[in-house]
Image (spheres, rainbow, N blue to C red):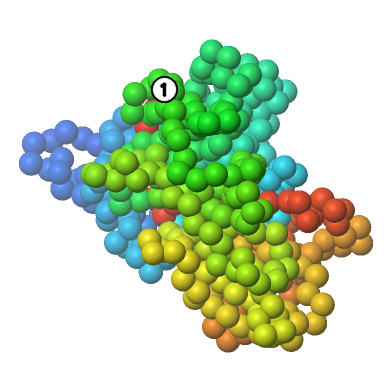
């Protein structure tokens, strides 16, 4: 069977930038009775040993290769052979400033040689050119939501695989609605569906304008929230497990978390909205309240004054409410701590990251919650196993820093295409 260099395809070159050249078998899978299944199994075993960026290029050889790569057998085989690779590439994205503050990549299922932020930038530049495409939401399953101002269309995309789906705008949607975000329905790490959610707030009710990948159309849903509030913050909702979570304030100016389930199951349809007060409302806190994600849970981080001692506290949102999972006091926390929280490592619940920036420079700090140790990182670090940690950038004006939100963007461990 002849070997040839990969086809001269600009899109492939962008995907494999920095990777060593990999020869591609251009011969289609032969359909010989009794041997076809055996050959497909053999090819799947070979593919499962490669990085996902290389497998993406194999998908484009022919329809049979694409069908094989996207088969459940190939996916399950790949994940079983890489079950110890629980890390995947991820980044903290600075909302509003639209920059990548921290990136973690390399030596995982994808074997990326550059950060997710650089993939997003190159994808936007190539796909939208001067059409003002900007990212308005990030997910933990490799999808971003893009809004183009000039034609008011939305796009759901994976900037690494470069799959992109255009969603035509609803009539007059942007004249009335606020962009809330995107939610996904997944099973075994495969995206089965997604919904783009816009919001309109009236005095006595709230309306959601929802695009569903299952129906391919927009629908309007009016809901009445079982609480009273004076303000809600829609600029950084978190998408997790089919729900959107955002911050709100009640008439007593107390902060609480609003969670709305856009994929309710069974008899939970009548209990889709949940309101959870933050666990430290009776204490003095250092940071404005914001949440992050880790290992499939919503997390809340703050420095709280406990008995006149500052402690770094971390809570996990459970069905019964907030659960305190860590409470530590270290010298760096008690001695004029001037960093702001970025979030938690999405795959490691013992690591919390903080960032500090000014006109002279910037610093990335991590704290190990299990042993209380901290580390100030270099702008670019490479571990012995090939992982790269990069503190790229962010706002440096102190007033802007205080008002900035950060979102985690995470690639999945598999590249199965999302619904068109």
Q: Quadrant of residue 109?
A: bottom left
Above or below, 115 relative to 62? below
Numbered disc total:
1
Q: Residue 382: percent from the left, percent from the top? A: 64, 69
Q: Quadrant of residue 92?
A: bottom right
Q: Residue 300: percent from the left, percent from the top? A: 56, 64
The secondary element bearing badge 1 is classed as strand
Quarter of the image with the N terminus is top left
Residue neighbourhood size for the residue with mark 1, other residues' Cα within 10 Å, grouped as few (<14), some (14–19), many (≥20): few
The extreme front residue here reads: 252
Identify the residue shown where x is 64% and y is 43%: 231
The extreme right residue here reads: 360
Report whether residue 118 is seen. no
Above or below, 193 relative to 94? above
332 relative to 88 in the view: left or right: right
41 relative to 226 in the view: left or right: left
Identify the residue shown where x is 45% and y is 44%: 226
Report whether residue 72 is seen. yes
For disc 1, the marked residue is 219
Identify the residue shown where x is 27% and y is 56%: 77
Q: Residue 174: percent from the left, percent from the top? A: 61, 21
Above or below, 391 relative to 182? below
Identify the residue shown where x is 58% and y is 58%: 291
The extreme top residue here reads: 171
Observer-nearest residue: 86 or 78? 86
Q: Residue 24: percent from the left, percent from the top? A: 41, 42
Quarter of the image with the C terminus is top left
Observer-nearest residue: 348 or 322? 322
The extreme left residue here reads: 34
Observer-nearest residue: 131 or 68? 131
């Amino acid at each position: 069977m002849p070997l040839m260099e990969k086809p001269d395809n600009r899109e492939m070159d962008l995907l494999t930038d920095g990777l060593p050249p990999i020869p591609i078998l251009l011969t289609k899978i032969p359909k010989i009775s009794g041997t076809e299944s055996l050959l497909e199994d053999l090819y799947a075993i070979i593919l499962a040993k490669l990085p996902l960026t290389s497998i993406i290029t194999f998908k484009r050889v022919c329809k049979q290769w694409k069908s094989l790569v996207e088969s459940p057998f190939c996916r399950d085989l790949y994940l079983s052979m890489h079950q110890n690779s629980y890390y995947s590439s991820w980044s903290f994205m600075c909302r509003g400033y639209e920059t990548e503050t921290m990136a973690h990549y390399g030596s995982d299922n994808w074997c990326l040689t550059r950060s997710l932020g650089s993939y997003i930038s190159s994808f936007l530049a190539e796909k939208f050119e001067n059409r003002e495409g900007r990212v308005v939401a990030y997910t933990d399953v490799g999808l971003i939501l893009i809004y183009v101002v000039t034609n008011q269309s939305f796009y759901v995309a994976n900037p690494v695989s470069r799959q992109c789906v255009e969603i035509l705008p609803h009539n007059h949607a942007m004249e009335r609605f606020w962009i809330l975000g995107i939610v996904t329905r997944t099973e075994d790490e495969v995206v089965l569906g997604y919904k783009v959610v816009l919001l309109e707030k009236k005095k006595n009710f709230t309306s959601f304008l929802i695009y569903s990948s299952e129906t391919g159309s927009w629908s309007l849903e009016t809901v009445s929230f079982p609480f009273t509030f004076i303000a809600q913050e829609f600029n950084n909702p978190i998408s997790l497990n089919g729900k959107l979570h955002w911050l709100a304030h009640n008439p007593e100016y107390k902060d609480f978390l609003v969670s709305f389930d856009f994929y309710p199951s069974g008899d939970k349809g009548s209990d889709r909205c949940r309101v959870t007060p933050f666990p430290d409302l009776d204490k003095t806190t250092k940071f404005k309240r914001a949440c992050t994600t880790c290992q499939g849970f919503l997390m809340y981080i703050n420095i709280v004054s406990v008995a006149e001692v500052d402690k770094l506290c971390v809570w996990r949102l459970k069905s019964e409410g907030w659960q305190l999972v860590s409470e530590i006091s270290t010298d760096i926390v008690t001695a004029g701590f001037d960093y702001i929280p970025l979030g938690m490592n999405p795959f490691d619940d013992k690591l919390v990251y903080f960032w500090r920036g000014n006109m002279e420079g910037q610093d990335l700090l991590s704290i190990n919650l299990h042993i209380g140790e901290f580390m100030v990182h270099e702008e670019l670090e490479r571990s012995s196993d090939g992982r790269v940690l990069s503190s790229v950038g962010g706002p440096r004006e102190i007033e802007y820093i205080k008002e900035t939100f950060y979102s985690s963007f995470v690639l999945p461990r598999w590249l199965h295409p999302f619904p068109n």
